[in-house]
Structures are given as C-alpha cells and as structure tokens.
Amino acid sequence: LSDIAAMGGEPMAAFLSLALPAKLPQKWVDQFLKGLLKLAKRFNVQLAGGDTAESPQSVLSDIVVVGSVPKDKAILRSGAQPRDRIYVTGQLGGSAAALALLRSGTRRLDPKSFPRHFFPEPRIEVGRVLREKRIAMSMIDLSDGLSTDISHLCEESGCGAEIWQEAVPRARIDKRSEVDLDLALHGGEDYELLFTAPANTRVPATIVGVQITEIGEITRSRRLILRKVSGANVKFKPKGWEHFRR
C-alpha cells in the first residue's frame, strides 16, 4: 500500500499467499486475517485471491497489492530537478526507536505509544492530494530509511541532495524526548512519504491532517550532503536497509 501511495495511486486488490505449519492454532490464523481484512476494508482493497500451503516449520506470508492511477499521472522517483525542495510527511524514527527498545528488553512497550511501528498506515490520501494538486514532482516512501531512500530517488533522477539536519522531524519517545537523530536519518519502516516540489510551489503545512516538513534541496551534483546544525557539510551515507546487502 505504501508503494502505491508513493506514486499517488489508489489501491484496488490484494493477493495473499500463506504457508502455515500444521500445528499452528486456528486462532492465530483468524486473528491474522482479521487484522489484514480490517486494513483492507479501510482502504477499499479487495482480497482477490492467493494460495495456501503447508510449511514444515515457520509461518511464511507474501502479499501482492495492485493499484491504479490516471494515465501518465503517476508520480515517479525520476522527476526531481536541481533546486527542488525536499519534503517529508509525519515524523521519522519512531518505528526504529520502538524496535531498538524491544530488542534491548529494558522496558515494556505500550503499542499505542509507538503507532508507526505497531500500527503502520500508508499515506494513501496524502499521495492522492499530492498528485491531484500537482504538488509533487517525484516521490518515494520511507520504508528503508531516509538516507537510503533519498539515495534511491536521487539515483533515478540523476541528481544529488542536501538534507538539513535541524529540519528533520523526529518522532517522540515520550512527551519530553525525541528519538536519536541516527534513527530518524537511517531507521526505516516509518512508511512516510518523501517528495520533491519546485522552490516556488506553495506546499501546505499539513495535508489531510498530516504534518509536512521541508528538509532539504535537490542539487545538480550527484552527491548526498548532510548540512549539520553547525553549518558544516558532511557526506550523507546511506545507512538504512539495503536489500541483498552482504
């Protein structure tokens, strides 16, 4: 769903394949499907088919979602231009912070305090508005981390980027503290949207109630730069999730 949101599309149907151990309780299967169908109903997605099979040990699942977008209106990763401004929705690092706390075992987490980790939601409506109002020239979802995903967008667009450290919106761990900067820059699974728009575009501060923050600028150079609070520029290396990395 998040990939479809990042193109300004509308989800239509899903195909689910499951491989389940023979001794898996039926209650687990029922709860799994209940959660999946609840989200599907919210975004008007039909469970159109799939497959089931027996697994010798672990639960294996795979889902394919198809969507639609008006002809020639899809927002691609390849549309960024030098001097475009870079924006993100929501706040970053919340999911990675929750995962770090879970792994540490230092505290019991209330799922409601970390909704982007326990209850991630695609920004379907935001993506639709960005397409319909012709605000976004390029877009990608932040599933692999800001540093990695901006590198993907710049590679497709043949450009570089300067990210302003102090502008990056960080999720809050509680009322008093924000997540570590590294989690906001490199942690993934937030499923927010990153998009670019020309410098003279009026980008609203919120879209359908979701915060929009300007965090940088597209550059002609193919380098990725992080402008620190001190004003110094450092190389912004992709340190998020990279598939097939060894």
Image (cartoon, rainbow, N blue to C red):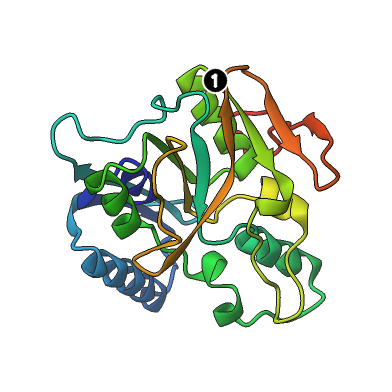
Percent x, y of residue 64: 30, 45
Residue 130 seen from this side: yes
Q: 83 or 244: nearer the eye?
A: 83
Residue at position x 68%, y 33% in the image:
238
Q: Residue 227 occupies which quadrant of the picture?
A: top right
Q: 136 or 108: nearer the eye?
A: 136
Q: Residue 42 occupies which quadrant of the picture?
A: bottom left
Q: Dot 1 surroundings within 10 Å: few (below 14), some, or many (20 or more)?
A: many
Residue at position x 48%, y 54% in the image:
192
Q: Residue 124 occupies which quadrant of the picture?
A: bottom left
Q: 121 or 154: nearer the eye?
A: 154
What's the amino acid at mark 1?
Cys
Percent x, y of residue 130: 32, 48
- 113 relative to 126 in the view: left or right: right
Residue 9 seen from this side: no
In the picture as drawn, the residue positioned furthest to the front comes out as 200
- 113 relative to 52 in the view: left or right: right
The residue tagged 1 is 159
